[in-house]
Amino acid sequence: MASTMRRRIKFLLLLAGLYDAAWRVIGLCRRMDPRLWGRNRRVRRRGAPDGFPLPPPRLAYAVAASQDLDYFFEAGRSGGRGSNPLAAIFS
């Protein structure tokens, strides 16, 4: 039932041309969480596990639909393992 409701809401937002704006509002609300600020601050102090520069939270959100940098790296790590068998061997 909840998935049917979500599909209907998504359809109506797309029909009205408000889908992208709704996602931006959701992202803004999630970004206001002080716990997320603390987690991201810790990740920024540690640095990226692969040594590459960290993306800004807005770009992490564009890729992973979350501004949580820990989630961003974990999603990338698990996605890489599933699509590349050599990555699973060397990680």
Image (cartoon, rainbow, N blue to C red):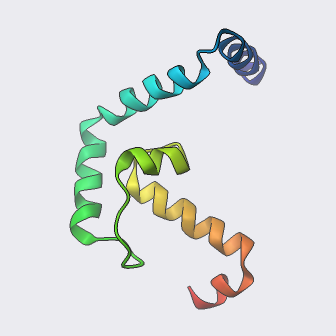
- 2, 73: nearer the viewer: 73
Give coordinates of residue 6: x percent, y percent.
70, 20
Q: Residue at x 22, y 55 (%)?
A: 41
Q: Is residue 67 above or below residue 78?
A: above
Q: Is residue 3 above or below residue 60?
A: above
Q: Residue at x 59, y 90 (%)?
A: 90
Residue 66 appears left or right of 9: left
| Viewport quadrant of the C terminus | bottom right
Give coordinates of residue 4: x percent, y percent.
78, 19
Residue 62 appears left or right of 28: right
- 2, 10: nearer the viewer: 10
| Viewport quadrant of the N terminus | top right
Q: Quadrant of residue 28?
A: top left
Q: Residue at x 47, y 57 (%)?
A: 72
Give coordinates of residue 47: x percent, y percent.
29, 71
Q: Is residue 12 above or below residue 38?
A: above
**Exactly how many numbered labels are in the figure?**
0
Q: Quadrant of residue 16?
A: top right
Q: Residue furthest front?
A: 17
Q: Quadrant of residue 30?
A: top left
